[in-house]
Image: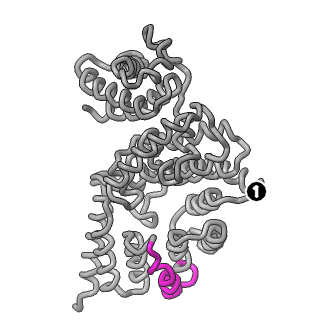
Amino acid sequence: MTRDLEDLLRELTPQVLGVLVRRYGRFDACEDATQEALLRAATRWPVDGVPGNPRGWLVTVAAHRLLDELRGEQARRRREDAVMPAASAEPPAPEPDRDDSLDLLFLCCHPALSTPSQIALTLRAVGGLTTAQIAAAFLVPEATMAQRISRAKQTIRTSGVPFGDAGADRLGAVLHVLYLIFNEGYTATTGPDLTVPRLSDEAIRLMRSLRRLLPRDGEVAGLLALMLLTDARRLARVRPDGSPVLLADQDRSRWDRSRIAEGIALITEALPEGPVGPYQLQAAIAAVHDEAEHIDATDWPQILGLYELLEQVEPGPMVTLNRTVAVAMVHGPAAALDLLATVESDARLARHHRLFATRAHLLELAGDHAAAAADYREAARRTTSLPERRQLTVHAAELDGRSRPT
């Protein structure tokens, strides 16, 4: 299967699943039917060609598969009877202009689910991530994540909440889910590629839709701005060989200025409205980076002030970890290392490769190349991203060469 076809099927997956769930309910059975249709498409389309209405083709095949299963399950006769009016005829033609992805997104963030289950199920159903990728994002074994997703599907099936019931209480989980989907696309947790652009693009597409629904919500605007301002650097952060380019070394002429302008306009409009949330503050930090023509022109005191606000609004070890870099640029690496020491024992961060990569960077700034190389190697050992592992390993070797006496 070609990459273009794989991308098309991934884009259509939440749309097809959304149509089925809206019509027939039974989230788990609808996902099974959707996967069956996707497998059939992956086999037939390379031979027969992509149909003129690929989503309609998938919906029809999946609906037939679902209805055949319902007819054959005698033990579930009462549930079958509830959908038999639709089963007595051909599945109706799909609405060409209706996209159920957002309704599916809110369904996956059902209040009966725990927040981790909401995120995991949405990443699976709407984002198209594999169970292994989701497990890596949560830092749990794949088997544990598979059980969590299975239990979430069961909860959805027995909840009785109608499809399309997009309660406001689920908005925070929805935003977090889209944030994770975007991050997985911007820096893949596993695999040979640094980025998975289709995931970032899908997260931005869904955020634009959510923004149209909730134009006055500051955090919706903030998250969309954050995505645009971050994604604007995509082309400049990967070398031709696939290795990552650090922000300080990027060719900023390759940044997408239209996305930067759109993101700055969004966050400039949202911030004065209040209250200010974490996505708005992260977007403001990204805007300061993007406004600098080169790394030396970066307004680090402003970035440090924004990180201090972010730490008040949403305290956590990862925010402190990010703040250490700004502290280093304003007050020097020694002050940053002292700050880093306050979170090194935090269980949520202690095993994360970014802790070691950040400490290595600060040690390098302080001139301790031998210690920095050791931490870069440890970060390389812990990351599951192959491009990041190669970059960290190469840089550790470079520092080893500098630290040897001549």
Magenta residues, dominant SS class: helix
Give the quadrant of residue 62.
top left
Q: Where, by quadrant of the figure, is residue 51 drawn?
A: top left
Query: At 50% across and 43% down in the image, what residue appears?
Result: 203
- Under circle 1, the secondary element is loop
To which residue does mark 1 refer? 274
Q: For the C terminus, which image quadrant? A: bottom left
> In which quadrant of the rendered view does residue 402 lie?
bottom left
Three-letter amino acid code of the residue under disc 1: Gly
Give the residue at x 50% y 73%.
321
Q: List x then y, in percent, for residue 134.
A: 39, 51
Quick check: 254 left or right of 212?
left
The relative height of residue 128 versus residue 36 in the rendered view (above or below) is: below
The magenta-colored residue range is 329-347
* Image quarter (top left, top right, bottom left or bottom right) of the N terminus: top left
Front position in the image: 269 or 210: 210
Q: Position of residue 383 (x, y in %)?
A: 32, 65
The answer to whether residue 256 is seen in the rendering is no
View extreme (bottom): residue: 405
> Would residue 204 be found to the left or right of residue 267 on screen?
left
Looking at the picture, tell me which residue is in the foreground, 66 or 359. 66
Q: Is residue 241 above or below residue 12?
A: below
- Residue at the right extreme of this rendering: 273
Left/right placement of residue 135 relative to residue 263 reads left
Q: Residue at x 60, y 70 (%)?
A: 315
Is residue 166 shown to the viewer in this render? yes
Is residue 342 inside the magenta stretch? yes
